[in-house]
Amino acid sequence: MVRQEEIGYVIDAQKTSFLKKDVGLIRDALADIPIANSYATIITGIRRCGKSTLLLQLLNRDYKEAIYLNFDDIRLAGFETQDLARLLAEIQRREIRVLFFDEIQNIEGWEIFVNQLLREDYRVFITGSNASMLSMELGTHLTGRHLAMELFPFSYTEFMQFKGLENNAEAVLAYLKQGGIPEFVKTDLSLIVTGLVDDILLKDIAVRHAVKDVNSLRQLTVFLISNTGNLISANKLVGMFDIKSSTTFLEYFSFLKDAYLLDFIPKYDPSLKVQARNPKKVYTMDMGIYTENASASTENLGRRLENLVFLHLRRTYKHIFYFQDKGECDFVALEKNQVKEVIQVCLTVTNENFQREYDGLLAAMRHLGVREGKIVTLNQSDRFEEDGIRIHMLPASEFLL
C-alpha cells in the first residue's frame, strides 16, 4: 500500500528528472505515434530503446503539461491494485488531462484503471517492455480502445544522423558493431548493454514468469545471441544448460521474444503445422547486444549483416520467414498474406558463392510467384534478369535507406 501523499511525491520527483532529460535526437517514430480521442496509445519495445525520451519529445511537441509516472521505481515497490484509486485521486487533484504511464503492467488490474480513465476523457499513453503481457491484458478490457506501436533502437539512418556519418560501407560496419541502443551509441560503454541484458532477464522474464533457474536462462540467452542467423530447434537443445524439456525451451524462447531481446522466424509454408515443427531462425534485436554478449571467436560480419537486414525488415513487417525448399533464401516478408519482399543477404559475393546465393533466391521467387528480388551485400551492385524475373544486387547502405 502506498499513501496518496507518497504517490504525489513520486510524481513530482519523477517529473523533475523527466523534464531534465536531454530530448536527444528527434526520433523518426515521433511522427508515427497513433493518437485518437477515447483510445489509449500503447508503445512497446526493448528496455532503453528510448520510449521515455519519445514521450518527452511528444510532450514538448503537443502538450503543455502531463503527468508522468514510471512504475518501475523502488519508491512504488509496495504499490497494489487498491492504490490505483489513490492514484486517480491524485490525478484529479492536479487537474491534468494527459497521462504518461511507464511499465504500468506491473500493477494487477491496471487495464481496468486505464479503461476508467478513457471513459473520463483522459488522454493516456502507456509504454512497456513486454509485448504479450500488454496485449493479453489489453485484449481483455481495452478491446478496440487502444492503438499500438513498437519502438526500436536507432535505425541506420538515425544512427548516421546521431554520429554525424556519411552513408557508406564504413557507416554500415560501424552500425553492425554498435547497434542502436541510444545510451550505448552515445557513450560506447559496454556495461550499458550487458546491464541491459541482465535487466531483461531478471525483471522482464525471471520475476514476471517465476523463472527460478536464472543461470540456465542466461546461458541459453548467450548461446542464442551467439548463434544469430542460425536454425534453432527446441528438441535438439534438450539436455543443454541443464534444461531437460523442449517445452521449457519453447517457453524461454517466447519470454525472450516478448521482451524484445531476441526474435525467431519460421520456415515459409502455408501450413502452420509445418511452420511449427521446423526449426526457427534466431536473430538478436540489436547489434550492440550481439557485440557485447556473443561468445563468438570471430567478427562474424556475414551473420551480422543478415541480422541487420532482418531488423530493417522487422520495422515494417511482422510476418517474416526464411525459405527452404529446392534452394535456401534468407527472408520472405509478407503483409496481409501478400509477399512483399524476397531477400538474400551475402556480405561479399564471389565466384565461389554467387551461384548458391543466386539460385537460392531464384528458387524462392519462382516458388512464390514473385518477379523482383534483392541480394543485399556490403558494398556491391549489379542487376540480373532471367525469364522476366529481375534480381537487384545492392549495397546495404542503399537498402537500409
Image: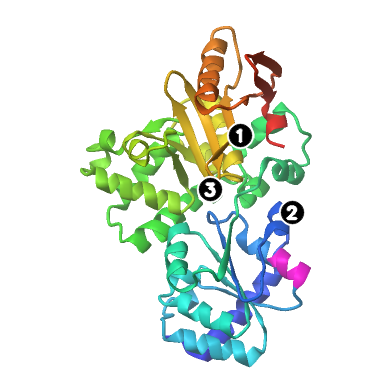
Span highlighted in magenta in the image = 56-62
Q: To which residue does mark 2 refer?
A: 25
* Dot in front, 1 or 3: 1
**Quadrant of the rendered structure where residue 288 is?**
top right
Helix, strand or loop at label 2? It is loop
Q: Disc number at residue 395?
A: none
Helix, strand or loop at label 3? It is helix
Residue 71 lies left or right of residue 158; in this view the side is left
Q: Is residue 107 above or below residue 258?
A: below
Task: Say what amino acid the circle numbered 3 marks.
Answer: Val
Q: Is residue 34 above or below residue 240?
A: below
User: Label 1 neighbourhood size at 10 Å, few (<14), some (14-19), many (20+)?
Assistant: many
Task: Say what amino acid the circle numbered 1 marks.
Answer: Leu
Q: Nearer the viewer, residue 21 or 221?
A: 221
Residue 222 lies left or right of residue 290; in this view the side is left
Q: To which residue does mark 1 refer?
A: 176
Q: Residue at x 47, y 75 (%)?
A: 111
> How much space separates mark 2 and mark 1, taking CA atoms?
20 Å
Q: Earlier in the sequence, mark 1 or mark 3?
A: 1
Question: Does the residue at mark 3 contact the one at mark 2 (Cβ under 8 Å)?
Answer: no
Q: Residue at x 51, y 73 (%)?
A: 71
Q: Nearer the viewer, residue 355 or 4?
A: 355
Q: To which residue does mark 3 refer?
A: 193
Seen as rendered, the residue at the extreme top is 351
Task: Say what amino acid the circle numbered 2 marks.
Answer: Leu
